[in-house]
Amino acid sequence: MMRKTLAVFTAVLLILIPINCFAASNGAMNLKAGQTITQSGAYYNDGVLYLELEPVCRYLSYTVTPADAGSDIRLTNGSDTIKIDPAGNQIVKDGHTLNVSYLSPEDTLGGGCMRLNGRLYMRADLLSHLLGLDVQTNETQKTVMVRGIIQNVLNIETKRNDLSEGLLTATIQYPVLSGPWNAQALETMNGIFKQAADSAVDQGRKNSKELENIAAIQKASGNEYGGTMQCSVYFDYDIKYSQNGLFSVVLSNYQYAGGAHGSTIQTSYAFDLNTGKQLALFDFMKKDSGYQKFFDAKVRNEIDSRVKEKILFENTPFQTLGDNPDFYLSGDGITFYFQQYEYFPYAAGIQEFPVSFESISQMLNPSYSRLSQKLNRTA
């Protein structure tokens, strides 16, 4: 078990949404970190925003050990060390491993990084996730501004378990929380995370047993099993929001049972650390604000846009999120998502639909109006 404090780290195999993706043109921009402006400190490559590592890390009191060819990049602040492995397309922070191989087509080094004119850059969305950054783009001034985010004082340990049992291999990572909050609440949350991880392993064992039985039956009938004799489980977590006394996390359960491909179930939670209450969407919203119709229209319009751009195909027409939709909190808003096959083909994966806090500020329950105010950004 490894400890991490304040700057929470995320490690679920989810597609990261490019920050300020409306700025799709390639080219250099200035980077403002605190009061320091770095010429060409930001760069758009294929519509993806990259930030120069050194000035961002200096602003946050991290040091950078640049990589030579084939070596790791290390970001260090006291006992806090982040290791970026470009060759392996992995990032490790305090024992929590993030696989970012799906980012490699845009990167010149891998690991979410690129080198340009001798300077080392990293994807803004990934860097923001790792270090806790608010990133804003001013198109008129050709400047990208970054500010640190003050996160909850919360200790997070990564509990990891690697299994190999017969036909089953499993990699399990889940969080264990501690800190100056409601102790009973943290105990309940930790129990939820552990139970979800244990259930994923149990499902993997069940899949493995069923695969053994199928293979045995076919062998007894004189046939050889034609599929892959292997089951696997990958269970991980992604802390999406840890500010303002609120904590939102996504758990990802990938299961492969020997078929053509595996499947992933995503589960999310939002907790109030002061009370331990598990929060539903209606807890955040004014009852008679019309928020349900607003969210339905937002999601419907975004689906139509993705279909029109031919990046998504809709199997079953979406009509409404319903009273208790799947969602999580992020630094910028509320993100809704759908499981594989729920509305779209398997190849579409888990589609996500973010809605900014700014756009719903008048609909928020006054108890949670702070979500849209961004009060915890540093200078």
Image (tube, rainbow, N blue to C red):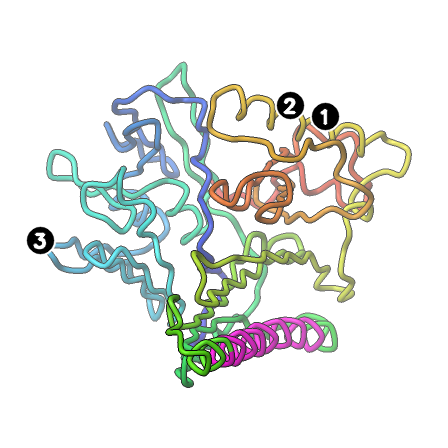
Give the residues drawn in magenta, as a range: 187-213
Real-space CA distance between mark 3 and mark 1, rounded to the nearest whole angstrom: 49 Å
Q: Position of residue 148 (x, y in %)?
A: 46, 46
Q: Nearer the viewer, residue 311 or 278?
A: 311
Extreme residue toward the top, this view: 140
Residue 88 is left or right of residue 228, and the answer is left
Give the residue at x 49% y 77%.
208
Picture disc at residue 297: 1
> Decide: marks 3, 1 in contact (CB < 8 A)?
no
> Decide: marks 2, 1 in contact (CB < 8 A)?
yes
Residue 289 is left or right of residue 109, and the answer is right
Extreme residue toward the right, this view: 288
Residue 7 visible within the image: no
The three-letter code of the residue at mark 2 reads: Asn
Q: Nearer the viewer, residue 121 or 367?
A: 121
Q: Position of residue 55 (x, y in %)?
A: 27, 42
Picture disc at residue 69: 3
Residue 316 is left or right of residue 43, and the answer is right
Earlier sequence position, callout 2 versus callout 3: 3
Q: Main secondary structure of the magenta part?
A: helix
Residue 341 visible within the image: yes
Give the residue at x 78% y 65%.
275
